[in-house]
Image (spheres, coloured by chain):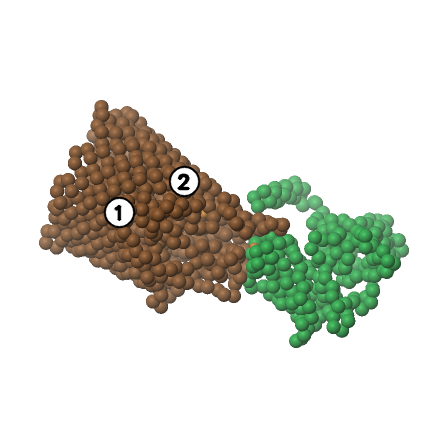
Chain colours: A green, B brown
Amino acid sequence: MKTLFSKYTFLLILAATAFSCSDNEVPFDPTVDLIKIDEGFAIGAATKVEVWASQDLMAGYNNIFIALYDSVGGSRITKAKIDFYPEMSMMGGVQHGCPVEEPAEEAVNQLFPGAITFTMPSGDMGSWKLKIEVQNQVNNKKGSTTFSISIANPTAACVKSFVTAANEKIFVTYNFPKKMKVGINDLDVIVYRMINMYEFAYEENYSFVLTPEMPSMGHGSPNNVNPTHASKGHYKGKVNFTMTGDWRLNLNISEGEAVVKDLYFDVEVE
Amino acid sequence: MRLICSLLVFVVVGVRAQSVDTLRTLYLSEVVVNSTIQEGDTLQNFFRANKSATTEDILSRLQGVYLIRRGNYGQEPMLRGMTGGQINLTIDGMKMFGACTDKMDPVSIYIEPQNLKSIQAVLGSDGSRLGTTVGGSVDMQLAQPFLSSQPVTGRVGVGYQSAWNGFNTYANVNYSQHKSAYNLSLNYRKADDYRAGGGEVIPYSQYEKMNLSAGGKWSMGKDTLLASALVDDGWNIGFPALPMDVGSAKARIYSLGYNRYRAHETVQNLNAKIYYNSVFHSMDDTQRENVEMHMDMPGTSTTGGGFVEGNFHPAGKHTLSFRTDYYHNQVLAEMTMYPEGASSMYMQTWPASGRSVTGIYLNDVYKINRSTQVTVNGRIDWAVTTLQEGFGMDQLQVFYPNVQSAYQQITSTVNGKVKQLIRSNWIAEVHVGYGERLPTLSENFGFYLFNRYDGFDYIGQPDLVPEKNWSTDLTLSYFSDQVQLTATGFYNYLPDYIFSRIHPELSVMTPGANGVKIYENIPSATLVGGEASVLANFSKNLQFITALKYTHGQDFEGTPLPLIPPLTSNTTLRYSIKNFNIQLENEIASSQQNVSPSYGEDETVGYSIFNLRSGYKINWNRKQLYVNAGIENMFDKNYHNHLDWGNLPRPGRNINVTIEFVF
Ligand SMILES: [Cu+2]
Ligand SMILES: [Cu+2]
């Protein structure tokens, strides 16, 4: 704790010094907490595309941030329509996509935030490619670029799937808008219904009972808020952690009166 | 030199003046150790005869004082059924708070009898000189260096206790110059697991500790400067009644004092001090077998403050004394658990939090005539309690989303006493008082504090209001040359009593715990009881003292409160001749049937034990050699008191020998 604290203090002081020395001339860097996954040129749109994420891409819900630049002048582009086309080529020859959330056409803090829920890791099973199509609203040109991406397999599954009684395949994943901490945390549970190999719909009619627990101790936490549907398959709730360590988020899913599925996600709170 | 002596006498008198009461209080509530005060000779001699006594042994003999035991170490003082935040436990008027979430370290453990000049206990709200209170105060006054015509004086001793194969070694040196004096004392104790009555060895009851203190005193005419430092290190301390032991307990106490005496000025006597103390306490269960999951629980508590106190020149029939003080206490207790094959788990059982208290106290003694004296005193405290933002606050938000980073509270105490001499031998004293006390930081912000007694995890409650006490005491005393009798009855009505309630909807944190309790103010509780004592001088050589104490406690629904001591009596018969003394002691505790099952209590049977102590003094070349020998629990009785956690039996027959050389 202490080392962490002092480290942050140090960074803060460093940051403060940096600001104070520069007469406020330092340009705002929107990617400061992000890591760059890859970059390429969407040829037809004369646009350079940078792919950023809050962490290495992994099987599960990934917050993706796209930065666009004019490939000639280098200036940032803050108006564009961006489409994600992720695709996995499996060893057996099968190919499929995964659920995506496309960014809005207006950049937020100079970036286009979106999300992709990779349903499998890459590796022996197959490999992922991400095609990004850009409709540059400045020059009104359209083009695309494709990245080979590697999708890590997290220690605990971040996306789970099951088949309903109606024989529909459902993907459930989660996202913490802020880094998990001890205390009260906002939690998004996101649910997609698979339509075909490349199309996924938001599942909006589920209800959840959320019960966090520490499996190694057998205890839970009080005053959690069950996720309820907000928009686009995102169910918003609150989860409370009373200590650091390994927690399990138990989710009982139902639709109306009918029980749909019980599943859980294991998370580590630092 | 003469001046210094009169000053010394004054200091002693000053201490007595602050206690306001006369003879009675002195020998029943104040024990003077290593001093020349004549009053209270019997008790004083009792402890003189038992040089291996710990501070706790001494405390347990005070009227209205009880001890909660969790093992052979770190017993917690209790005044008439009140303990913890309900009482002020101070060292030389300095506030100091333990760093253990399980109350293993009441600050009395950091004081060795070698460092101790006297203990002063004032019961009930009347003890508010050191802070507004409901239960009273215990102040341990430390021995100061003294000016003497002999440059070097001191004592060296070694003691042995058979029941725990315990050794106690101490040395104490006073070095005096013309206008300055210095002292240094060192004490080392080591104890193995103790043997209970009947032979059973109680595992995890060992301990080892070292105590070092040094002081300086500089006299400048009527002014005196004092500096002192105390270092107490304990390690490998077992707590058999708890699931964890103490790997390391460290206390540091530093103070700078100033004393001023002007007999004819408005402020006659002025005493000022600034101080700083810190406690580090680290619990772990690495020594225990069959532990499901190992954990570390370090805690720290630091306190800094200062006070100015004194008394005014008597004006007419009034004598006014005052005290104003400030302290800040800061605590943090952490817990890290190490499950097998999973990431470690961390939480703050006492979130980083603190409290600053500023207070003022006034006491007026009004001597109406030779036989009637009225005392009125009052105190007001302004407290700011802070919860540091960050981890601990985030934690508490799980229970209290609106928990704040600062809380302000004002508490006060008012007391009135009338003391009436009836005929020439009887004194009646009536006390009526109102007191308030702050919730402790543990009661405010504690986070899953496991209580081994009831097996519940405890959660604090930031919105607790101060606990109150409306109390009255009536004391009757009779004095003659041969006999002294005292009987006191007390009644305490405590609105907003701080207690706890089970919350079945909450899941426990500690594996195997019975449930979760949250502190709350209950409508009220009542504590009634009394003390009585008889002191008789049968002859110049034969003395007899017996003391009885009783407390009954219940909540507003008539349910017994937990940890209420049973009826207890202590009797001593002492024979002394020339350089030899011997005393037989008997301690009786009744059974306790008024128990709190929801606190995990069961009924406790009574007991009666006998101790024998003796001392022999050899004069040798103007120096003395003291040899003390005794047998505690002579008949090796297997017993425990109702206040002993976990029904843990107390030590069995204990043969002890102490040899002390005084130079
Ligand atoms: Cu836990
Ligand atoms: Cu402890």
For the residues beneath circles 2 and 1, the answer to whether they share a chain is yes
Q: Residue at x 16, y 34 (%)?
A: B578
Q: Residue at x 34, y 57 (%)?
A: B604
**Numbered circles on residues, count:** 2
Circles 2 and 1: CB atoms closer than 8 Å: no
Q: Residue furthest front?
A: B198
In front: B389, or A45? Answer: B389
Q: Earlier in the sequence, mark 2 or mark 1?
A: 2
Q: Is residue B50 above or below residue B152?
A: below
Instruction: Locate residue B91, reporting x and y percent.
Output: 34, 43
Instruction: Specify the amino acid type for callout 1.
Output: Phe
Instruction: Specify the amino acid type for callout 2.
Output: Asp
Question: How far apart are the alpha carbons under marks 2 and 1?
Answer: 23 Å
- Label 1, secondary structure: give it: strand
Q: Which chain is home to disc 1?
A: B
Residue ID for mark 2: B192
From where the camera sits, is residue B238 visible?
yes
Q: Which mark is residue B404?
A: none
Residue A7: quarter of image: top right
Quadrant of the drawing holding the N terminus of chain B: top left
In front: B619, or B36? Answer: B619
Instruction: Locate residue B210, reporting x and y percent.
Output: 40, 36
In front: B338, or B573? Answer: B573
Does residue B445 appear to the left or right of B91 in the view shown?
right
Residue ID for mark 1: B610
